[in-house]
Amino acid sequence: MFELRKYTAPDFSEDKFRNAPNVVLEPAPMDGVAPMTYHAMSIFPEYFKVDGQWLLAEESRMDCVAVFENGKIIVREFRLLKKGDLVVTGRTEKCGDGIYVHANGFAEQSAEKDVFAFRQNRSRETAFSRDYDEIYELLKYERDHGKIVWVMGPAFAFDADARRAMSKLIENGYVHAILAGNALATHDLEGAYLKTALGQDIYTQQSMPNGHYNHLDLINRVKYHGSIKKFIEEEHIDNGIIYSCEKCGVPYVLGGSIRDDGPLPPVYGNVYAAQDAMRNEIRGATTVISMATMLHTIATGNMTPSYRVMPDGTVRQIYFYCVDVSEFVVNKLADRGSLSARGIVTNVQDFVVNLQKGLGL
């Protein structure tokens, strides 16, 4: 049985906490602008001393600011600040400014390591068998006790087996939300409508005559019907990732790109509206699996903390996996501050089919 790693809160009876000053709160000078000495948030649990009490920022996000509001610490994007918001200031992390960053709350016991050893990083040579076993158990647990958010590039839509595997994961409760772009939905629906993705047969990979029109024809037809849901109903679509989301009531957020064709009706054309919609899904996430989309993965990693405060007040870990055939993508996520992300270097089509089989679907 899968067990969550237990969270160990700081011992606030220690002298460093008792002797720490209260945080200094300064009003935002204007909308969208923080005081010059603002404190920027990390992915870790952070505590702030206000009127002698240490308060946890219950819903955090990296590269945002902490605001004291209605007796709580609220983490807010710079662009959403309002003039007069009481912003936490100070750039120390060990109580000096009444701020404590708790980076080891979910510390794992680890064996002593040699100073020199081979293959310490995650690469194409890493053995991922244990990772798969852990993911199987994690997903079984999270299906009933958490929220699993998938961040997906269009690579799945190019392969018949991967589309079927992802559909089975959705229909068996292992997907609670999908974050993607126009391309995933377009080529997945193209596969259901015309049996191609970018004009190639999704099974044989054979290019069809005038196949380069297919994704444009698909977008045009969906726009004719006015919505993806109406398109699925009127065109009698009965397979695919988006079909399964609509069938099972699984929300999907499609964030637009400057290179998009069309795009499909539900695609967010405003990048900040897309960011808000993505964060609304991430707010409750307890496991995030990002696959084959560097920019969406980094964006999601930026808005996903390492912890979640549950309704009963307990603090639990958020699990974050980044799956890509490119080592560069997997490592870049950690370089951008998402230090708790676990990387798996493999073909994402194979990955999702292995998940489907390993879960017995």
Image: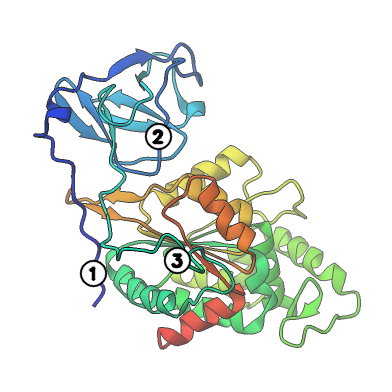
Density class for disc 2 (Cα within 10 Å; few <14, some 14-19, many ≥20) is many
Q: Which residue is under mark 3? A: 249
Please name whichever residue, 210 or 30, is drawn nearer the observer in this view of the structure.
Answer: 30
Question: Does residue 35 appear in this view?
Answer: yes
Density class for disc 1 (Cα within 10 Å; few <14, some 14-19, many ≥20) is few
Kindly report the distance in space between the C-alpha atoms of the residues bearing marks 2 and 1: 28 Å
Q: Which residue is under mark 2? A: 41
Please state which amino acid type lies under the numbered disc 3. Gly
Q: Is residue 15 above or below residue 195?
A: above
Q: What is the x, y in percent for residue 357?
A: 47, 87
Please name whichever residue, 25 or 199, is drawn nearer the observer in this view of the structure.
Answer: 25
Please state which amino acid type lies under the numbered disc 1. Glu
**If you read the primary sequence from the N terminus, does the residue marked by circle 3 or circle 1 appear first?**
1
213 sits to left or right of 323: right
Q: What is the x, y in percent for residue 94?
A: 28, 31
Q: Is residue 281 above or below residue 37?
A: below
Q: What is the x, y in percent for residue 206?
A: 83, 84
